[in-house]
Image (cartoon, grey):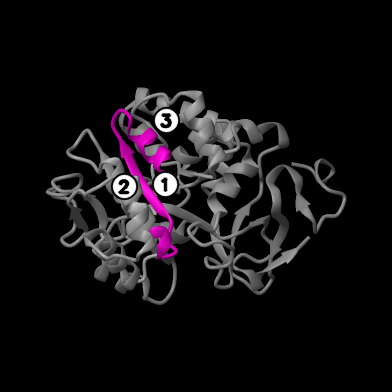
Amino acid sequence: MTDAAHSPDPVGPIEPLGPLARRVRRSLNGDHPGETGTMLPPFIDHHVHLQLADAAPAVARGIAAVVDLGADPGAIATIARADGLPHVRYAGAFLTARGGYPSGRPWAPGGSVRELDPVSGDADDVRERRHHALSGPVEAAVDEQRRFGASVVKVALNAVAGPVFDRATLDAVIAAAHAAGLPVAVHAEGTGMAEHAIDAGADVLVHAPFTDRLDDDVIARAAAAGQAWVSTLAIHVRDDASVAETAIDNVRRFHAAGGRVLYGTDAGNGELDPGVNPDEVAALVRAGLAASAVIAALADPWPERSPGWADAGVATFVPDPAPADDDLVDPDAVARWLATARLVPTEELEPR
């Protein structure tokens, strides 16, 4: 990649990589004196399970922060308070229907699931309960996660594996979470479950929909509502090519419709390369995300509203050579390059 391909200001943004990319060299006083490369914001894996996966290898390979989406609330709160990287935001327990996923799963840590009975009444009753600040089991479950420090509420809607919340109960959970200032992130699996979450106004789908090809109008509604999707494509690339193609196609159309895509791997779900996962990156590029959009998905501050929580004086450094401009649409080239990302103290990086 030549200087002529970018802004005439060598300290300014590297245009094909987005507004936050900078050409830098490492300090002569550091571990790799004079090494050149690209500085990017700290990267975030927006879907992990820290009770099931060691975060240290991911940090060693470029991940500064993570969002845990299902754990015992007390255990994850303790993990999040630990010094050093990664910085952690978390959901606490899965909220699910009585007997619903992932209750009874051997991999689900003790205390990581809260089963809720259906609420009585319809959507009007839910709004009335919220207006009068009436407390019930749903509100208590949401408040428990909040008191343990959760930044998001996780809901499981897996119709393949068991019962799921009906609309009134899902509405009640979303209303209680929003009243507490927390977004709602939904695991939607099974026919109609993504639509169920979209129609109820869930803020995030924690997996790009993979059960079925969603209709264009459903995707348009999700994007128009400002919903975000966490990618988690690499688990399908690993396990089932046809499912991967369905998920990638849904992401392609969601991104084209203006939808917000977040990078996430579901770390803890079987064997996955730690750090910036090349299969995840390649699948995102195949879904039509330019390199700049992949970087934006990696650096998105969700569930926080503003950037900075993943910073702590570090930046992502990706050494040269970066892909040539023509290669920034090549899934393998972008994946190979970003997979070399490492965290470096910002004070060790000098503009060039």
Residue drawn at point x = 57 percent, y = 43 percent:
294
Q: Nearer the viewer, residue 294 or 71?
A: 71
Instruction: Decide if residue 128 is on the left or right side of residue 165.
Output: right
x, y percentage for residue 27? 68, 69
State the SS at label 1.
loop
Tell whether label 3 touches label 1 (CB within 8 Å): no
Q: Could you give the CA–CA distance between mark 1 and mark 3, rounded to whole angstroms?
A: 19 Å
Q: Nearer the viewer, residue 322 or 181?
A: 181
Tell whether label 1 touches label 2 (CB within 8 Å): yes
State the SS at label 2.
helix
As for residue 179 lying within the magenta part, the answer is yes
Comes first in the chain, label 1 or label 3: 1
- For the record, the magenta segment spans 177-201
Residue beneath disc 3: 247
**Amino acid type at mark 2:** Leu
The N terminus sits in image quarter:
top right
Q: Nearer the viewer, mark 2 or mark 1?
A: 2
State the SS at label 3.
helix
Q: Where 308 sits versus 120, above or below?
A: below
Residue beneath disc 1: 202
Residue beneath disc 2: 170
Instruction: Decide if residue 116 is on the left or right side of residue 190.
Output: left
Quarter of the figure with residue 246: top left
